[in-house]
Image (spheres, helix red, strand yellow):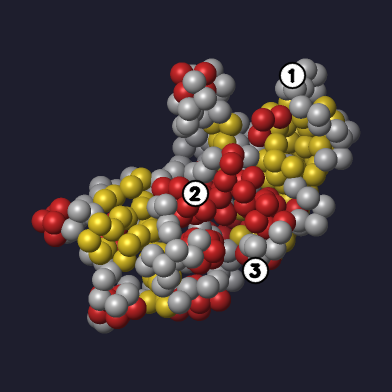
Amino acid sequence: MDTMLAGRLHVPSGQFRVEEVPVPVPGPGEVLIEVKAAGVCLSDVHLIDGSLKPFVPVEEITLGHEVAGVIHSLGPDLGGDWTAGTRVALQAGQSCGECANCRRRRAPCLLARTRGVDYDGGWAQYAIAREDTLAPIPDDLPFDQAAIIPDAVSTPYAAIVATGNVRPAQAVGIWGAGGLGAHGIQLARLAGAAPVIAVDPLAGARERALAFGADLALDPADPDFAAAVLRATDGRGLDLAFDFAGVPAVREQAALTLCRGGAMVLAGLTPQPLTVTDGTRFSWNRNEIRGHYGSGPEHVEQLIRLAATGRLDLSPSISGHLPLAEAAEAVHRLENKVGDPIRLVLVP
């Protein structure tokens, strides 16, 4: 076992290819993971098209930040009781362990790095993982479902329960019913939000939103949109509005739906300016705008427990499986919404 297949991106040129590379060797505090499943995310698409760049300058990178597999071999100086064959999901983020926040055990890490963005990820037959990024998974949780928990599920989960602090019976709006938003709908319902209102311009996405637990699915271009939100919330408006689309027009519309004291949570990413159409109304209502990014290790661990105990069913989220050798095809399908996938999974 000297070489393996890996999906490699040459960052300066944007050239992506699946090729043979040496199998990595785990160093101190690391393990070698035999990858069993790796999710394909829009972030991977954006890395390839150049609209997203690694935070740490890098020439080439193995993509893939949603990864699950088994421990194949152990590096030296491990602090935990890890053994070969243990089933794990890999945290997408990795703290530096050296900055002021890490030394003080405060979040977020000032120099955090992301797997498959700043260092080699899991679109490969084998991947290196630092032991503090390992999250054990039970035998009855399928690898494909475990793989998508970091990011595809944990990002909206953290947005809902942490940044949004959703409470039972609060009215929640979810803009965008794609890979993040569909889970946001599912998780808002799990948190007790009522009603959960999904907003998406695509009819198929609105149907999916209803299947994932939305009480109502609206077209943002409907002339009756604002009135429909008020009818569904007994005239109050939304306590929380979540942008999972990262579109400026979404944010302007969402801000106008908030009730007094309501907040808008920005989970979708965009470099475009943030504007509020009616600033006076926003201030009079004591509204808030909260930025959100990613999730913490505790969120991944909580979601694994929720999925393992049957509180959260992630099987409908798996839109298809492709062999690792066809990673470019998976990227094409996601980028062009072929089959309108929630998550495609690569299987080495």
Residue underneath mark 1: 28
In the image, which is nearer the foreground, mark 2 or mark 1? 2
Say if 343 sits above or below 214 in the image: above
Quadrant hosting residue 71: top right
Question: What amino acid is found at the position of numbered circle 1 in the picture?
Answer: Pro
Disc 1 residue crowd, few under 14, some 14–19, many 20+, Cα 10 Å: few
Question: What amino acid is found at the position of numbered circle 3 in the picture?
Answer: Pro
Residue underneath mark 3: 316
Disc 2 residue crowd, few under 14, some 14–19, many 20+, Cα 10 Å: many
Q: Where is residue 265 in the image (x, y as percent from the top left)?
A: 36, 53
For marks 2 and 1 on the same chain, the one whose residue lies earlier in the sequence: 1
In this rendering, position of residue 220 left or right of residue 78: left
Q: Where is residue 140 in the image (x, y as percent from the top left)?
A: 80, 57
Q: How far apart are marks 3 and 1 (CA)?
A: 38 Å
Number of numbered discs visible in the structure rendering:
3
Q: Position of residue 139 (x, y in %)?
A: 82, 52
Quadrant hosting residue 127: top right
Task: Give the farthest residue toward the left.
Answer: 280
Question: What amino acid is found at the position of numbered circle 2 in the picture?
Answer: Ala
For residue 49, say whether it is visible.
no
Q: Is mark 2 on a helix, strand or loop?
A: helix
For marks 3 and 2 on the same chain, the one whose residue lies earlier in the sequence: 2
User: Which residue is at a point 38% across and 58% down the rendered structure image?
Assistant: 242
Q: What element carries label 3?
A: helix
For marks 3 and 1 on the same chain, the one whose residue lies earlier in the sequence: 1
In this rendering, position of residue 251 left or right of residue 163: left
Q: Residue 158 carries which label?
A: 2
Picture quarter with the N terminus: top right
User: Which residue is at a point 66% across and 34% down the rendered structure image?
Assistant: 133
User: Which residue is at a point 36% across and 45% down the rendered structure image?
Assistant: 291
Q: Where is residue 12 in the image (x, y as percent from the top left)?
A: 50, 34
In the image, which is nearer the foreground, mark 3 or mark 2? 2
